[in-house]
Image (tube, rainbow, N blue to C red):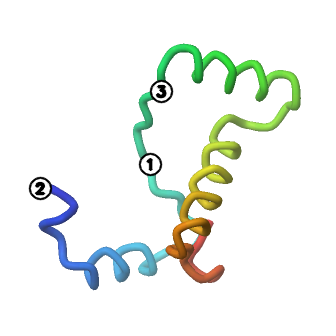
């Protein structure tokens, strides 16, 4: 099923149900050069790659005005 085939209400309710701190698993594919730089940054700073990716997604959503309220985010 394609995400566009799912009603927006069902997407919101599935994220809110259960544990509000639950993280949605996702697969992200990056070009090798970006993946290597992300790994290097994570090693150097001792911050998880997933933390950097969540921050980048939040920044992108904020830029385009689609950041969810803090209760349902992270």
**Disc 2: CA contacts within 10 A as few (<14), some (14-19) or many (>=20):** few
Seen at 60% across and 66% down, the residue is 63
Q: Earlier in the sequence, mark 1 or mark 3?
A: 1
Q: Which mark is residue 25?
A: 1
**Disc 1: CA contacts within 10 A as few (<14), some (14-19) or many (>=20):** few
State whether residue 25 is above or below residue 44. below
Residue 8 located left or right of residue 30: left
Q: Nearer the viewer, residue 60 or 51?
A: 60
Seen at 75% across and 19% down, the residue is 40
Helix, strand or loop at disc 3?
Answer: loop
Q: Nearer the viewer, residue 69 or 60?
A: 60
Residue reaching furthest to the front: 64
Q: Quadrant of residue 5?
A: bottom left
Q: Earlier in the sequence, mark 2 or mark 3?
A: 2
Comparing labels 1 and 3, the label whose residue is closer to the camera: 3
Query: Whole-Å distance between the Cαs marked 1 and 3?
Result: 16 Å
Residue at mark 2: 1
Dots 1, 2 in contact, CB < 8 A: no
Residue at mark 3: 30
Residue 60 located left or right of residue 12: right
């Amino acid at each position: 099923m394609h995400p566009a085939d799912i009603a927006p209400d069902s997407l919101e309710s599935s994220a809110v149900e259960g544990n509000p701190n639950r993280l949605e698993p996702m697969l992200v594919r990056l070009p090798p050069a970006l993946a290597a730089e992300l790994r290097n940054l994570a090693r150097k700073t001792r911050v998880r790659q997933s933390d950097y990716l969540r921050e980048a997604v939040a920044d992108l959503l904020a830029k385009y005005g689609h950041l969810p309220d803090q209760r349902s985010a992270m």
